[in-house]
Image (cartoon, grey):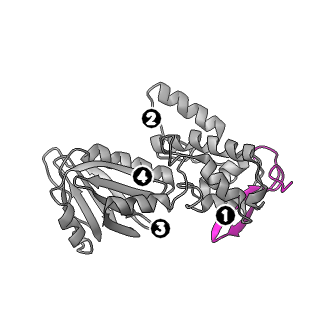
Amino acid sequence: MPEGHTLHRLAGALDGAFGGRTPEVSSPQGRFADGAAVLDGVAVDRAWAHGKLLFVDFAGGRTLYVHLGLIGTWFVVPVTPAGTVPEVTGAVRLRLLSEHHVADLRGPMACEVLDEARVDALVARQGPDPLQPVGEHNDPDAAYRRIVGSGRTIAELLMDQTVLAGVGNIYRCEVLWRHRLHPLRPGRSLKRASWQLVWDDLVRLMPWGVRTGSIITLDDVLVDTEAAWDRGERSEVPREFAVYQRTGLPCLRCGSTVRHKVVAGRNLFWCGGCQRRT
C-alpha cells in the first residue's frame, strides 16, 4: 500500500493538472458511472491528501474521495501536443480529462463522491499527518496520547492510521532504528521526548519523499539529495535503507544482525543490538 508521501505527491500532480479547470469526468469501466455524472463538467477547486486518503474538491461542496488500497493506481500524464487522448486500457474506474492532461484511476479500494460533512468525519478518524501544515491535523500530542495509552507495540501503533496518518512499513522500521527504539516495546513505555524526536524526524524526512518520489531515511543519502536539489539537479535517489529488508545483514550503525518478525501481518525489521528492549 502506498505510504503517505505518495498520496501527497499524487495530490500535487492532480492539483497542478486539474486545479481551477473543468475536466471531463467519466467511468470507462462503468463502476463509477453515477459518481462521474455528478462531477462531469464541474470545476476542480483543489486536490489534497491526509495520510493515505486522497481528496479532490469540486465546486459546490462535492469531493471525490479515493483510497488506493493495495493495488490501486492513479497516474497523471500529459495529452500529446497534437491533442491525441490516450486510449483507455484495462479496467479504468475513473478518468479525468482536460485539454492538457489525463488521469486514469484503476483498482482503488474506495472511490466515492462525498459531501463536506463526510469528508470531515473521515479525516477526524485519522491520526495527525506529519505532512500536513502545522495545526489541527498536524498535532504530535494527539498521536502521543493514543500511543502512551496503549499496551500494543510501538510497531503496531505507528502503522495504525487512527494513531498516525501516512506512515507505512518502511518509514516505521527506519525511524525506529534511527532513534534506537525497540519496535516490540509497548506504547505506554514510550517517553514524550522520544516520541517528539520520532515525530520531528518524520516531519523532516517525509517531505523529501513527496519531492523525490523516493523514501529517504539515511542521513548521507539525504545530505546528497539536498545538495543536488540546491544545485538544481534531480538525479535518481538510491533505494538504500538501514534495516528494511536487510534480514541477517549487519546493522549499518553497530554491526549487529538485523532481525525480522511478522507483526500484525507486516514484515518488521530492526537491529538486535542498538535497538534493544531496554
Image point 50% across, 42% down: which residue? Answer: 135
Q: Can residue 143 be seen in this view?
A: yes
Tag 1 or tag 3, which sits nearer the N-term? 3
Tag 4 or tag 1, which sits nearer the N-term? 4
Asked if the magenta segment contains residue 175, the reply would be: no
Instruction: Please name which of the two marks, 2 or 4, marks the residue nearer to the observer.
Output: 4
Instruction: Please name which of the two marks, 3 or 2, marks the residue nearer to the observer.
Output: 3
Question: Which residue is at the front of the view, 257 or 118?
Answer: 118
Q: Range of the magenta residues? A: 252-278
Instruction: Please name which of the two marks, 2 or 1, marks the residue nearer to the observer.
Output: 1
Q: Pointer 4: what residue?
A: 49
Q: Residue 194: horizontal and vertical position, in percent?
A: 74, 45
Which amino acid type is marked by label 4? Ala
Toward the top, the furthest residue is 231
Image point 24% across, 61% down: which residue? Answer: 95
Which amino acid type is marked by label 1? Glu
SS label for mark 1: helix
Which amino acid type is marked by label 3? Leu
Q: Pointer 3: what residue?
A: 70
Alpha-carbon neighbours of circle 1 within 10 Å: few (<14), some, or many (≥20)? many
Tag 4 or tag 2, which sits nearer the N-term? 4
